[in-house]
Amino acid sequence: MYQTLLVAGALSLAACGAVPPWSAPSAGTPTATIPVTPVNGTTPRATADTCGAARFRHLIGTAVPDPFPFSGPLRLFRSGDMLTMDHRPERMNVELDRNSDTILAIYCG
């Protein structure tokens, strides 16, 4: 019985192989880094501009337009809101002030 448990434990650990190393983006992946300058002391972010966020940087510090002039996947959220951790490069994230509709940051992911 003890030998059976020992073999089962060894096989379980063997299944937990090493995680493959992170690979660099392919040649077709955009690599430009776009700094996003937030207002009101929030944490700045930098990300690849895979969704075209740089075109909307002029909206930072203004009220969010309705409708927002972006046709792709869009996530509007208030600073401090709980968010999913999935990274979608084509999605534009627009962070709003907690107490108003002022845009604090615009970035991809």
Image (tube, rainbow, N blue to C red):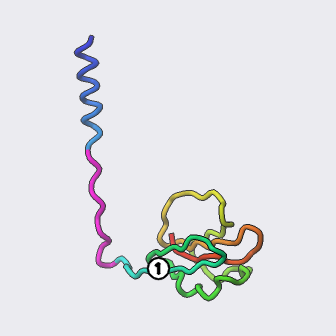
- Expressed as whole percent of the image width and height from the top left, the position of residue 52 reads 51, 82
Residue 20 is covered by the magenta coloring: yes
Image position of 11 with respect to 19: above or below: above
Q: Which residue occupies the foreground of this view, 20 or 81? A: 81
What residue is shown at x 29% (from left), y 78% (from top)? Answer: 27
Report the predominant secondary structure element of the magenta stretch.
loop
Q: Which residue is mark 1?
A: 49
Q: Is residue 27 left or right of residue 56?
A: left
**Bounds of the magenta segment:** 18-28
- Expressed as whole percent of the image width and height from the top left, the position of residue 5 reads 28, 18
What residue is shown at x 67% (from left), y 77% (from top)? Answer: 103
Q: Is residue 34 left or right of residue 56?
A: left
Image position of 76 with respect to 3: above or below: below
Quadrant for residue 14, please give it.
top left
Classify mark 1: helix, strand or loop: loop
Q: Which residue occupies the foreground of this view, 99 or 15? A: 99
- Expressed as whole percent of the image width and height from the top left, the position of residue 75 reads 62, 69
What residue is shown at x 54% (from left), y 71% (from top)? Answer: 91
What residue is shown at x 72% (from left), y 67% (from top)? Answer: 98
Residue 27 is covered by the magenta coloring: yes
Image position of 36 with respect to 17: above or below: below
Q: Is residue 14 left or right of residue 59?
A: left
- Expressed as whole percent of the image width and height from the top left, the position of residue 36 reads 53, 79
Name the outermost residue toward the top: 1
Q: Which residue occupies the foreground of this view, 108 or 71? A: 108
Q: Amino acid at mark 1?
A: Asp
